[in-house]
């Protein structure tokens, strides 16, 4: 029984040593972002973009944001995004009734502090009564 246990340990050490040698010879598994740009694939999640001209400030994006990264103020017609809290899940994009939100597949430059994006919408067009 002890011989079998010793053989299993020796086999595991051998597998681990092989794995270490492969990793040393292969090189790093990561890239040197931001010095080398990241690869963009069809499923890359970059950053959130809003087309404020189409926004009706309904707040559905805020209600469905799991990270509470979006603030919408209908009276002031402002839309605010905390980019440090946003997890780019896409819930806000899928629930927006006017399709004014989208995810752009490019990365933002790194930042050391929280970044808030505040966008003010245009004044609503008033309909004149004849």
Image: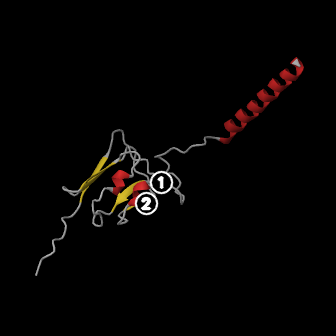
Q: Nearer the viewer, residue 8 or 20?
A: 8
Residue 81 placed where, x, y %? 32, 50
Residue 71 placed where, x, y %? 29, 50
Residue that label 2 marks: 94
For residue 11, side relative to residue 124 (left or right):
right
Residue that label 1 marks: 45
Which-is-in-front pick, marks 1 and 2?
A: 2
**Residue beneath the point at 54% across and 58% down:** 41
Q: Secondary structure at mark 2?
A: helix
Residue 103 placed where, x, y %? 42, 58
Whether residues under marks 1 and 2 lie with C-beta atoms below 8 angstroms apart, the answer is no
**Residue beneath the point at 43% across and 47% down:** 87
Q: Quadrant of residue 101?
A: bottom left
Q: Secondary structure at mark 1?
A: loop
Q: Quadrant of residue 98?
A: bottom left
Residue count near mark 1 (Cα–Cα under 10 Å), binned few <14, some 14–19, many ≥20: some
């Amino acid at each position: 029984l002890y011989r079998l246990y010793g053989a299993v340990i020796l086999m595991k050490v051998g597998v681990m040593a092989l794995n270490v040698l492969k990793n040393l010879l292969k090189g790093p598994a990561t890239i040197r972002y931001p010095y080398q740009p990241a690869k963009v694939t069809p499923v890359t999640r970059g950053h959130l973009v809003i087309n404020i001209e189409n926004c009706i400030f309904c707040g559905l994006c805020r209600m469905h944001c799991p990270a509470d990264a979006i603030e919408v103020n209908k009276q002031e017609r402002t839309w605010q995004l905390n980019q440090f809290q946003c997890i780019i899940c896409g819930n806000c994009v899928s629930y927006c009734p006017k399709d004014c939100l989208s995810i752009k597949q490019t990365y933002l430059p790194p930042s050391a502090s929280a970044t808030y994006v505040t966008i003010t919408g245009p004044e609503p067009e008033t309909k004149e009564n004849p």
